[in-house]
Image (cartoon, helix red, strand yellow):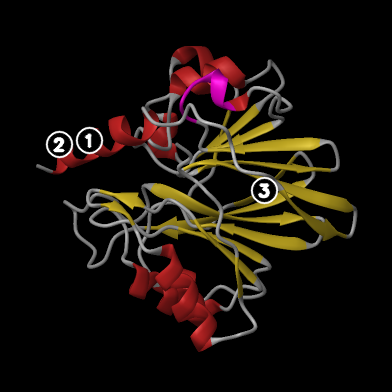
Amino acid sequence: MRFFLLVFLSSFILGSVTAQRDTPDQVPTNKGSLIIQPLVHASLVLTWDNQTVYVDPTGGAKNYTGLKQPDCILITDIHGDHFDPKTISAVRTEKTVIVVPKAVADKMPDSLKSKVVIMNNGDKGTQSGIGITAIPMYNLPESATAMHTKGRGNGYVLNIGGKNVYLSGDTQGIPEMRALKHIDIAFVCMNLPYTMNVDEAADAVLAFKPKTVYPYHYRGQGGLSDVGAFKAKVEAGDKGIKVVQKNWYPS
């Protein structure tokens, strides 16, 4: 059953990403603007200081038309809505570095393995002038049969021009998320039964208090999560947190 649900999720999402992308946002940093380009589901592009980072690129090269090719690719997990080797091969250059957890590296095609940098939970590094810290992501309660087991995938905290950007990956409101400090921008998932519901996501965000939060990765088995309700819950709990709603599922 779990395998069926994951196959359904990947095919449902990756088959629906041909429409026009949402507009990018610009965030000032200590070295020019960080440009945030939402794409679909868990996929986004970050551009700063002439460096471009693709996060969980999926859906084929057509989704990246008109965007600068990546200096760095970040992959969070092994599932098809995050790890798409065909898209990686289509969008990368010979100089692209691919940052992945070991579980993803183990599944990487031989043609891409020489470009891989493995980071596991707790590891820190720098790529393209951007500081990268790998953060746990997993389901609660912890279980060997969970869709996302602790230690397999990575969330990431990026330091980009003095701004700390958190990418949750597939997770619930785990202690490691709730303990985060000084996050300027957070991308937080919410889709049952794969990650967490809107209430849990809002509660976690209110615990670690990012300055700005983007709900993303919010299509699940039952359709789209109510990100409007998420926004209302966060803003009711802390008016100092800005919730930015973008269209991650254009039709």
**Residue tagged 1:** 8
Between disc 3 and disc 1, whose residue precedes? 1
Q: Please tell me whether residue 142 is drawn above or below residue 69 in the rendered image.
A: below
Camera-nearest residue between 175 and 57: 57
The residue located at (68%, 17%) in the rendering is 93
Left-right relation of 107 to 209: left
Circles 3 and 1: CB atoms closer than 8 Å: no
Within 10 Å of disc 3 (Cα), the crowding (few <14, some 14-19, many 20+) is: some
CA separation in Å, label 1 and label 2 = 6 Å
Q: What kind of element bears circle 2?
A: helix
Within 10 Å of disc 2 (Cα), the crowding (few <14, some 14-19, many 20+) is: few
Circles 1 and 2: CB atoms closer than 8 Å: yes
- Give how far across and how far down residue 69 sits, in percent: 70, 24
Instruction: Place residue 27 in its image quadrant.
Output: bottom right
- Give how far across and how far down residue 11 sits, in percent: 29, 30
**Residue tagged 3:** 125
- Give how far across and how far down residue 156 sits, in percent: 56, 53
Residue range of the region highlighted in magenta in the rendering? 58-63
Circles 2 and 3: CB atoms closer than 8 Å: no
Amino acid type for the residue under numbered disc 3: Gly
Q: Which mark is residue 4?
A: 2
Left-right relation of 67 to 144: right
Camera-nearest residue between 104 and 166: 166
- Is residue 176 in sight in this rendering? no
Q: In the current view of this chain or complex, which residue is farthest to the front?
A: 251
Q: Nearer the viewer, mark 2 or mark 3?
A: 2
Q: Is residue 205 magenta?
A: no
The residue located at (37%, 26%) in the rendering is 107
Between disc 2 and disc 3, whose residue precedes? 2
